[in-house]
Amino acid sequence: MNSIPIVMAFDENFAIGACVTMYSALRNKLPDTDYSFHIMTREKLLDSTYEKFNELKIQFPNTIINFIEVDDKLDNAYTSGYWTIEAYFRLIIADIFPNLDRCIYTDVDVVICDDLTELWNTDIGTNIIAGVRDISIGKDHIKSLGIPSSEQYIYSGFLLINLELIRREHLTQNFLKLISVGYKRHDMDILNVVCYNRIYFLPYKYSICTINIFNRDAFNKDATLPICPVDEIEDTLDNPIIIHYVTEKKPWNTHCDYALLNHLWYQMALESPYKINYLDNMLKGRNDPTKLTGLYDIHYNSRKSSTYRIGRAVTYIPRKIHKLIRRC
């Protein structure tokens, strides 16, 4: 029986996302695979939130879920935008969990669509971390970090981490020296700077961002960098294992008719202990405007804006032509 440690970090605001991520992993695993979730928080969550996670253990009996509160050693970390202090917690996993030699780390805005045993069995050699290359990174940003090439830069949202090696080489200290520097991409920049040239590249199916999933051109935008073979692109886009809902607009706090693959997140959310019924809530919001929450008000208020109305007017004729073509 495989017991795979998965580490996560979040606060109360991201608890829904975390529960859905965990549920998706458990729902889509193989029968002989088991996961142990190790969760880092800065403070205790609500009792009702812990009850939701306990429901996962009841539904999937061999599942282990451990919570640990992290002290204030990261309070001086630089944050901006929608990044939180918890994002830096992945930098101290080796110290927080000394009994783990390696682990999978995942952000909580992902859906896990398949079993992770194959990933877990990946031999990354003497590399420190394994992740998916960032296809959107710009050369100017790489230059600002002082690292030679964008070919070595990866996303930090889903990682396989060699914790034993981090402890042996005292790399946590190197991470912590950089948390207050003010890097634009925060912990992601720190990992790429410290681990440069000791990164194992995973197939893109292990972290496909929703902003790229229908954009095949994004994978090969730079002709000088053969980012991804065509067959891997097709496999990634057709059979993703990790779907990452990047940007500050998450499926649980906003809604958009054109949000890529949000329906998969809503499916997992409806089946999860939170049992979020998107359609039900949407209809309630329409019938009673006072019940509109952050999940929908952005969407409906945007339809009232002048920008939206102008856009609808400008695209009226092209939309009519498109409909006629589809009917032919």
Image (cartoon, grey):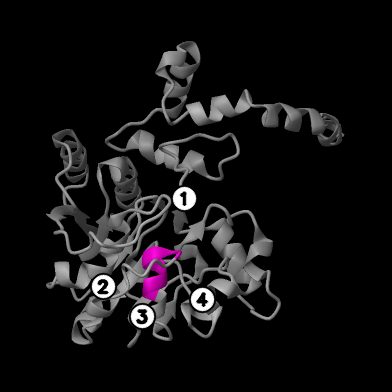
- The residue indicated by pointer 1 is 245
Residue 125: percent from left, percent from top: 34, 86
SS for callout 3: helix
Which quarter shows the N terminus? bottom left
Q: How far, Cα to Cα, is label 4 from label 3? A: 14 Å
For image coordinates 45% across by 67% down, the residue present is 155
Badge 4 is on which residue?
144
* Residue 194: image tag: 3
Looking at the image, is mark 1 or mark 2 nearer the viewer?
A: 2
Q: Is residue 129 above or below residue 126?
A: above
Residue 33 visible here: no
Crowd class of label 1 (few under 14; some 14 to 19; many from 20; radius 10 Å): many
Which of the marked residues, 4 or 1, is nearer the chain's N terminus? 4
In magenta stretch: residue 85? no
Sequence-wise, the earlier of marks 2 and 3 is 2
Provide the residue span drawn in magenta.
Answer: 184-191
Q: What residue is shown with label 2?
A: 176
Question: On the image, which quarter does residue 301 sit in?
Answer: top right
Q: Is residue 91 left or right of residue 246?
A: left
Question: Mark 3 is on which residue type?
Answer: Val
In the displayed structure, 328 sits above or below 144; it is above
Per the image, label 1 sits on a secondary structure element best described as: loop
Determine which of the numbered discs, if any, sits on residue 164 in the image. Answer: none
Locate residue 322 relative to residue 155 in the image: left or right: right
- Dot 2 amino acid type: Leu
